[in-house]
Amino acid sequence: MRSEFGYIDDNLKRIRDNFSGALSRSGRSPESVRLMAVTKTVAPEAVNHAIELGVGLLGENRVQEYLSKEEAYDKSAEVHIIGHLQTNKVKYIIDKVSMIQSVDSFKLAREIDRLAKTHGRVMDILCEVNIGGEESKSGVAPEGLDALLDEVSQLENVRIRGLMTIPPPSESDVFLGRMEELFDRIKSENREGVSMDTLSMGMTGDYVQAIEHGATIVRIGTGLFGARDYSKK
């Protein structure tokens, strides 16, 4: 008998088929890209069904929402924070997630470093880049990224693993290409304290192109769980 979450099975099959095509066209291995399930407004039962199907990485946008659902989640999945993170909220998630993808200021990185130290851990982070220069989005400007990397790389309890971005949807392919160039340039410089092994970009509307432009994590919500109700808090 088909479960109530059978639509997730169908969506995941479609996503995996699209993954295979994009990886084949770009000559990449299946292990080179991870699918992240973006869980904003999604019921824990639906999230757990996706985990049962082999989706082992979750992306959380809102600290408060995540804390309300954390106990109900299958603990086998890895969790990253992908939404804008205020410094006063870091303390709530510092011991609960394995990566913070949305670091866009030294102030935030310094608070993560301070709290990670008190918990005896090193927090993996990505620096978020506002590749399209959009006022409505967070992220460091591309021209400010080098300075941010230089500052953050000096901190002892954070580890820079790479970059994250949300490109303008109207010209996604252009900006995905620019992000790939930026990532490759920094990676080639072999900076001390900076490990460029993760490029998080691509969502439901552009994840295929993101894979073709070198993404190592693509973040899919609607494409996996269906249209979301943004009125929910």
Image (spheres, rainbow, N blue to C red):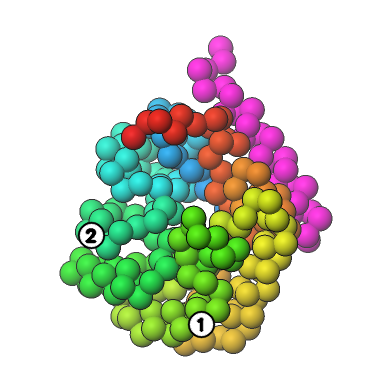
User: On the image, numbered disc 1 is attached to which residue?
Assistant: 146
Look at label 2 and name its amino acid. Asn
Q: Looking at the image, which residue is at 62% across and 43% down?
A: 204
Location of residue 88 in the rendering, given as x and y in whole percent from the top left corner: 23, 59
Residue placed most toward the observer, 17 or 94: 94
Location of residue 89 in the rendering, given as x and y in whole percent from the top left corner: 25, 56
- Magenta-colored span: 1-30
Q: Looking at the image, which residue is at 35% across and 57% down?
A: 85
Q: Is residue 154 visible?
A: yes
Q: Quadrant of the C terminus?
A: top left
Q: Looking at the image, which residue is at 39% across and 60% down?
A: 100
Q: Distance from label 1 to label 2 (Cα)?
A: 25 Å
Q: Looking at the image, which residue is at 55% across and 70% down?
A: 197
- Is residue 14 part of the magenta span, yes or no? yes
Which SS type dominates the magenta stretch? helix
Query: In this rendering, would 178 be left or right of 43?
Result: right
Badge 2 marks a residue whose secondary structure is helix
Q: Which mark is residue 88?
A: 2
- Is residue 9 part of the magenta span, yes or no? yes
Residue placed most toward the observer, 112 or 34: 112
Q: Which mark is residue 8?
A: none
Q: Is residue 31 visible?
A: no
Q: Quadrant of residue 220?
A: top right
- Point out the tag, 1 or 2, that comes first from the N-terminus: 2
Look at label 1 and name its amino acid. Asp
Badge 1 marks a residue whose secondary structure is helix
Q: Quadrant of residue 226?
A: top right
Query: In this rendering, would 1 be left or right of 78?
Result: right
Location of residue 171 in the rendering, given as x and y in whole percent from the top left corner: 70, 56
